[in-house]
Amino acid sequence: MELLFATRNAHKATEVRALFAGTDVILKTLDDAGIDVDPPETGDTFVHNALEKAHYVYTLTGLPCIADDSGIEVDALGGAPGVHSKRFSPAETAEANNTLLLKKLDGVKDRSARFRCVLAIVGIGEDATLDGRCEGTIAHSISGTAGFGYDPLFLPTEAPGRSMAQLSMDEKNTISHRGRAFSKLPAFLKSRT
Ligand code: ITT
């Protein structure tokens, strides 16, 4: 089955491609399809934004579409940055976002956090969402160079002593919010075809 992945984030696309390599789920990104749009995300929840992105591209193309809305929730910040993870700092770069997060947690003891991902599927029967999460804590400094975004600051509970940015892509996909949400996709597709 071919699905159009409504993302402009090359890191997400690389991770998800690795998950489906050698399977019959064929993913095309917007770039692959030559579609030059940036799907809107105007809501306050991952579910709203994931469905909004998938709908936007489905309306343009009529092709079955999926979209991922994801982010990091920090308990001591009341769940922020959450859906605003990408635009947490004014500069909107990973480096500036991580610096701001460290600043906001300066002197804070409770550093518990989680990554969340909602995967929306539009155009295969009723709209649907699948989700995944990964629990951990925010480190006191960055480490590692793999991955993207907040990975260098995130210490997954399931990978003691390493940040998400110190895991291989396969290791990240096994425990990550995105890996968990997308690993539910084959069974979902089977149930709809
Ligand atoms: P698309 O909407 O085009 O898919 P995006 O980067 O705008 O790409 P989101 O709105 O879902 O995606 O925001 C995701 C942000 O959350 C991302 O930019 C990172 O800051 C953070 N994030 C999500 N997943 C992450 C991961 O696996 N590792 C590190 N940071 C992540």
Image (cartoon, rainbow, N blue to C red):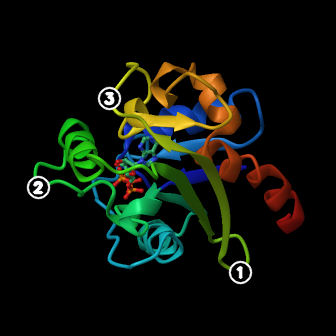
Of 83 and 81, nearer the camera is 81
* Left or right position of 69 against 91: right
x and y, in percent, of residue 178 in the image: 59, 47
- State the residue position of label 3: 141
Instruction: Tell me: 154 left or right of 27.
Output: left
Q: Nearer the viewer, residue 48 or 34?
A: 48
Residue, disc 2: 90
Vertically, is 52 above or below 146?
below
Residue under pointer 1: 126
Point out which mark residue 22 bears.
none
Residue 65, given in percent of the width and then of the height, sits at: 56, 62
From the top left corner, tell me how far across and down residue 53 is, in percent: 43, 68
Question: Eyeballing the image, is 72 above or below 83?
Answer: above
Dot 1: within a 10 Å radius of its alpha carbon, few (fewer than 14), some, or many (20 or more) residues?
few
Foreground mark, 1 or 2? Answer: 2
Asked where in the image residue 99 lies, by quadrant, the reply is top left
Residue type at mark 3 is Ser
| CB at disc 2 and ligand 1 closer than 8 Å | no
Rendered view: 156 above or below 112:
above
Dot 3 crowding, Cα within 10 Å, few <14, some 14–19, many 20+? few
Name the kind of residue labelled 1 in the image: Glu
Separation (CA) of disc 3 from disc 2: 20 Å
Residue contact at pointers 1 and 2, CB within 8 angstroms:
no
Is 84 situated left or right of 172 in this image? left
